[in-house]
Image: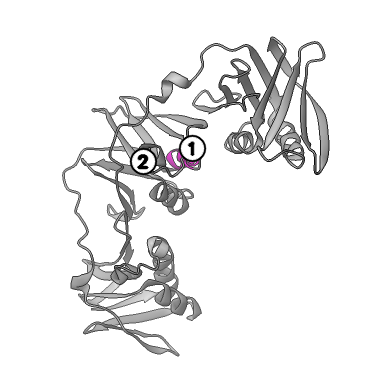
């Protein structure tokens, strides 16, 4: 293999593909990147056996071939090179890099030892605006929690209906759901559970890119394909295995009737909860007293070792007065995922789930359980 490529393009590709590379003591080959040539492209591939990242860079291919080299070492070395054209060449299992003032050899490994990457061909797929998809995914992705007893809730649930994508996540104490309308109707219904780690990588890698994302389905894997702008060819592909099992029927816990409905300024609400959190007890408890007469929400917290804090926030309130407590961390997480300036806080009952949702966006809800009084 021998190619010419701009250093900045190679660095960009390595920065993305090395994201799933880590120290794997049992399979050290996974600490490497597979560098390959395909037609007029340099192809970089990495995997941790759960997630595969493939990236293509338009390059001048002088001689075809492939080589496997340590990802972190290559990334560190390339970062020190000046921004100019470089030549990379494989001889045997080693990679040679040459530029104006550098001539380097990096010891590689046998490409045949690199895991076989499955090919996706002639599979069902749908297309969606990439930024809308990544923004929706980012609103739920951090809610999932690792669970040995319930592996299903360790991932993100996706349901693709005819005209909509539903993305949901829960850790049994709170739940987030985002609905994204599809511009083009989906021919078939699909559902799957994506592990949290590749879901986060999709956001990290693709969230700032404008274009159409293609999602391809198979029985036990899913492929997210983002194309090049200039030509009809993939730029980045992220493939992940799926979590087996049935996702909980979470719709049953979403309340439909509420005792009290409150509309507040999101930033003021968030700041007062953060202030109250400084005085919360070991249960992270913050109390809310809804005063219907004064149209105020009283937020208080107390810790015998620190002190106590109480504040009031004006709000639009409908329904009944109520006193209720929540884990402040759960409320902060929900509010940070809401993009609107005002938030609706619906409380079903003293010991029942409450809902946070943005004003003007019916597509997102965040359900949180209160702390039960002893």
Q: Residues within 10 Å of mark 1 (few under 14, many from 20)?
A: many
Q: In the rendered image of this protein, does residue 178 appear above or below residue 278?
A: above
Label drawn at residue 140: 1
How much space separates mark 1 and mark 2, taking CA atoms?
17 Å
Residue 69 percent coordinates (x, y): 32, 76
Residue in the foreground of this view, choosing between 293 and 103: 293
- In the rendered image, the residue lying farthest to the left is 122
Q: Residues within 10 Å of mark 2 (few under 14, many from 20)?
A: some
The colour mode here is one colour
Q: Main secondary structure of the magenta part?
A: helix
Q: In the rendered image of this protein, does residue 191 appear above or below residue 30?
A: above
For this view, does 264 lie left or right of residue 68?
A: right
Residue 140: in magenta span: yes
Residue 235: in magenta span: no
Q: Nearer the viewer, mark 1 or mark 2?
A: 2
Residue 56 percent coordinates (x, y): 31, 62
Residue 19 percent coordinates (x, y): 42, 61
Image quarter of residue 45: bottom left
Q: Secondary structure at mark 2?
A: helix
Residue 182 percent coordinates (x, y): 37, 29
Label drawn at residue 323: none
The quadrant in which the N terminus is found is bottom left
| Picture residue at 38% right of the left edge, 50% below the top | 198
For this view, does 174 lie left or right of residue 9?
A: right
Which of marks 2 and 1 precedes in the sequence? Answer: 1
Q: Which residue is mark 2?
A: 151
Image quarter of residue 124: top left
Image quarter of residue 325: top right
| Picture residue at 82% right of the left edge, 36% below the top | 308
- In the rendered image, the residue lying farthest to the front is 374
Q: Which residues are magenta?
A: 131-141
């Amino acid at each position: 293999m021998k190619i010419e490529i701009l250093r900045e393009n190679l660095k960009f590709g390595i920065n993305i593909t090395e994201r799933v590379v880590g120290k794997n003591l049992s399979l050290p080959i996974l600490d490497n990147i597979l560098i390959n040539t395909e037609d007029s492209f340099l192809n970089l591939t990495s995997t941790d056996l759960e997630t595969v990242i493939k990236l293509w860079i338009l390059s001048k291919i002088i001689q075809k071939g492939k080589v496997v080299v340590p990802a972190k070492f290559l990334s560190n070395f390339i970062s020190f090179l000046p921004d100019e054209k470089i030549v990379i060449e494989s001889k045997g299992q080693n990679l040679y890099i040459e530029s104006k003032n550098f001539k380097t050899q990096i010891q590689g490994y046998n490409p045949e030892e690199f895991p076989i990457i499955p090919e996706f061909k002639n599979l069902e797929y749908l297309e969606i605006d990439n930024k809308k998809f990544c923004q929706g995914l980012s609103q739920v992705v951090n809610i999932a929690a690792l669970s040995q007893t319930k592996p299903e809730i360790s991932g993100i649930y996706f349901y693709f209906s005819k005209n909509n994508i539903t993305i949901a996540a829960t850790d049994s104490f709170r739940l987030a759901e985002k609905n994204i309308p599809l511009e083009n109707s989906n021919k078939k219904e699909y559902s799957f559970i994506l592990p949290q780690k590749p879901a986060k990588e999709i956001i990290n890698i693709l969230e700032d890119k404008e274009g159409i994302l293609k999602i391809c389905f198979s029985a036990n894997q899913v492929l997210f394909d983002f194309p090049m702008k200039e030509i009809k060819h993939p730029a980045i592909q992220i493939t992940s295995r799926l979590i087996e099992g049935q996702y909980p029927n979470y719709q049953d816990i979403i309340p439909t009737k509420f005792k009290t409905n409150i509309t507040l300024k999101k930033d003021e609400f968030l700041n007062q909860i953060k202030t109250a959190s400084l005085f919360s007890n070991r249960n992270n408890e913050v109390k809310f007293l809804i005063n219907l007469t004064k149209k105020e929400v009283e937020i208080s917290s107390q810790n015998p070792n620190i002190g106590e804090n109480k504040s009031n926030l004006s709000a639009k309130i409908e329904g009944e007065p109520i006193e209720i407590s929540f884990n402040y961390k759960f409320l902060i997480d929900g509010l940070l995922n809401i993009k609107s300036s005002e938030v609706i806080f619906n409380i079903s009952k003293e010991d029942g789930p409450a809902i946070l949702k943005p004003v003007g966006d019916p597509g997102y809800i965040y359900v949180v359980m209160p702390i039960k009084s002893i």
